[in-house]
Image (tube, rainbow, N blue to C red):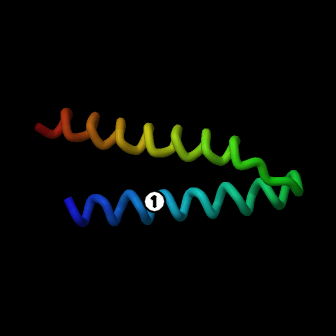
Amino acid sequence: MDARRNLYVAAFVGASLSYIFNVLAFTGTFDVFRWFVFAVVFLGFTFGFEKFIGWQTR
């Protein structure tokens, strides 16, 4: 579980940094609520795809 947690954290940090820099570059403003929604959707899709792939490879 430790390696999986590290992958989730690394993916979350990378996606968050990408989101923040892109939002700042294109809009010039940052909204914490929109970032929170992005984070929830990103982690939801990541977890969902992991479960889907696990179900397919069983």
Which percent across, then down, holds residue 10? 44, 65
In this rendering, is residue 15 above or below 51?
below
Left or right: 26, with 57 as reference point: right
Which percent across, then down, holds residue 58? 11, 37
Name the residue at the front extreme: 32
The image shows a total of numbered marks equal to 1
Left or right: 31, with 38 as reference point: right
Question: What residue is shown at x 41% (from left), y 44% (from top)?
Answer: 46
Name the residue at the right extreme: 28
Question: What residue is shown at x 70% (from left), y 42% (from top)?
Answer: 34
Which percent across, then down, holds residue 33? 69, 42
Left or right: 48, with 40 as reference point: left
User: Where the N terminus falls, by quadrant?
Assistant: bottom left
- Which structural element holds mark 1? helix
Local crowd size for mark 1, using a 10 Å CA cut-off: few (<14), some (14–19), many (≥20): some
Q: Tag 1: residue type? A: Ala
Which percent across, then down, holds residue 22? 75, 57
Q: Which residue is mark 1?
A: 11
Q: Nearer the viewer, residue 52 or 23?
A: 23
Question: What residue is shown at x 52% (from left), y 63% (from top)?
Answer: 13
In this rendering, is residue 1 above or below 49?
below
Question: What residue is shown at x 45% (from left), y 59% (from top)?
Answer: 11
